[in-house]
């Protein structure tokens, strides 16, 4: 199997990027003007900038001689619902926003995001984490970039997936929308990833759409090596899982399954049936394996055939249903014998109907068991199944 690779986390520029900002401004041509003492003091006192960065910025924006423009920017943010924390984070990550012309530069870009449905505190939180988008061209990048994303994101009610995608990787709008992004879209289509599958991949792993072609080919090879062929309906899920995984993490999860008696081939077969297996945390997998083998006493073959049960929420699905299942089976309330794995696959409505509502005499106790309580308990908090 080829080596697993992971992507750098470049989709947001957090406030901790001050050092890189300093490096950027330090690389700019030196100006003959002296540092702007007003701006130096303003950045240090209002936004806690390091003096070295404040000095570099003051040289870059030496034409700013009064607090009028920075104050206008901050007041505009407050007027549209930004909190002080939102403003602070925005300025720390993208200090050039402070010297923008509100009417000509800043307001049109903010209205661009308002038109997507963002407003008030939601807009403030979004911009504070993606302030880079206020520093790029509206006409050359934001508008055309948005159009290309909309063409892919199908059935996107209220632009929810669009906003989530941009929030996960704001470089989709900050970069040239007609370069690598479009070529990668065509590459995914050549692998049979189209329509809703392409939309899902963009929403959940947008950084893939900015990866190099070499990187994508490596990932496709890794998925194929794991036994999921291109054009399979599971291929996109395998690609998503592998793209989130390092070789070290894969080996640790493989060793975890080996410790419970599964071979490498069995582990890969389980992945083929449920690719999300590789995205499930090691802690959750270990807890699930322990529970199903020791508490439920499943045979290994049963778990091998139904690996999806390891992805269910233990707290919200597995443990509540197990408590009810134990009572129902111990009292022989069911006419037909059902396995616990079958019970797990029932929809919520089916489970409530078959295991809670139909047994009138035992309904109260079953409901309390489902909620993790005991008869006579007044506590509303749920308790985990004892191991």
Image: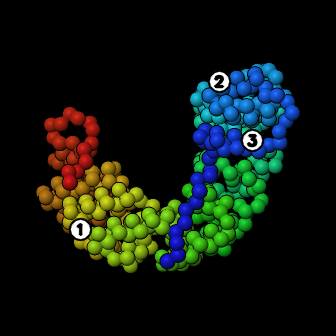
- Provide the secondary structure element on which disc 2 rests: helix
Mark before the other along the chain sequence, 2 or 1: 2
261 vs 209, left or right, is left
Query: Which color mode does the image show?
Result: rainbow
Q: Nearer the viewer, mark 3 or mark 2?
A: 3
Report the residue that reaches farthest toward the left.
Answer: 331
Residue bearing mark 2: 46
Q: Residues within 10 Å of mark 1 (few under 14, many from 20)?
A: some
Residue 281 lies in quadrant: bottom left
Frontmost of labels 1 and 3 is: 3
Disc 1 element:
loop
Residue 141 sits above or below residue 281 on the image: above
- Quadrant position of residue 256: bottom left
Image location of residue 116, percent across then percent down:
68, 42
Q: Mark 3 highlights which residue?
A: 26
State the residue position of label 1: 298
Quadrant in the picture for residue 341: bottom left
């Amino acid at each position: 199997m080829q080596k697993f690779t992971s992507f750098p986390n470049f989709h947001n520029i957090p406030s901790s990027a001050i050092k890189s900002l300093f490096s950027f401004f330090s690389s700019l041509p030196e100006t003959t003007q002296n540092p702007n003492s007003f701006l130096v003091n303003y950045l240090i006192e209002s936004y806690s900038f390091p003096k070295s960065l404040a000095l570099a910025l003051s040289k870059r924006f030496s034409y700013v001689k009064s607090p009028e423009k920075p104050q206008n920017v901050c007041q505009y943010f407050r007027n549209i619902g930004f909190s002080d924390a939102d403003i602070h984070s925005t300025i720390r990550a993208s200090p050039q926003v402070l010297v923008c012309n509100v009417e000509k530069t800043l307001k049109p870009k903010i209205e661009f995001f308002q038109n997507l449905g963002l407003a008030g505190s939601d807009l403030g939180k979004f911009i504070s984490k993606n302030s880079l988008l206020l520093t790029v061209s509206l006409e050359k990048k934001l508008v055309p970039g948005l159009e290309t994303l909309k063409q892919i994101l199908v059935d996107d009610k209220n632009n929810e997936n669009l906003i989530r995608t941009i929030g996960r990787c704001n470089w989709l709008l900050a970069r040239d929308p007609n370069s690598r992004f479009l070529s990668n879209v065509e590459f995914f289509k050549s692998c049979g990833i189209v329509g809703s599958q392409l939309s899902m991949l963009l929403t959940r792993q947008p950084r893939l759409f900015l990866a190099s072609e070499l990187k994508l080919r490596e990932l496709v090879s890794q998925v194929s090596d794991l036994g999921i062929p291109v054009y399979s309906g599971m291929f996109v899920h395998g690609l998503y899982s592998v793209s989130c995984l390092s070789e070290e993490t894969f080996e640790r999860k493989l060793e975890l399954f080996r410790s419970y008696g599964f071979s490498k081939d069995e582990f890969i077969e389980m992945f083929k049936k449920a690719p999300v297996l590789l995205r499930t945390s090691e802690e959750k997998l270990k807890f699930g394996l322990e529970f199903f083998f020791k508490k439920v006493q499943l045979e290994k073959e049963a778990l091998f055939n139904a690996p999806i049960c390891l992805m269910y929420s233990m707290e919200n699905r597995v443990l509540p249903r197990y408590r009810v299942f134990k009572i129902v089976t111990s009292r022989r309330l069911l006419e037909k014998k059902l396995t616990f794995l079958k019970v797990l696959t029932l929809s919520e409505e089916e489970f409530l109907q078959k295991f809670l509502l139909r047994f009138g005499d035992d309904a109260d106790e079953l409901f309390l068991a489902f909620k993790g309580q005991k008869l006579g308990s007044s506590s509303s908090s749920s308790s985990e199944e004892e191991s």
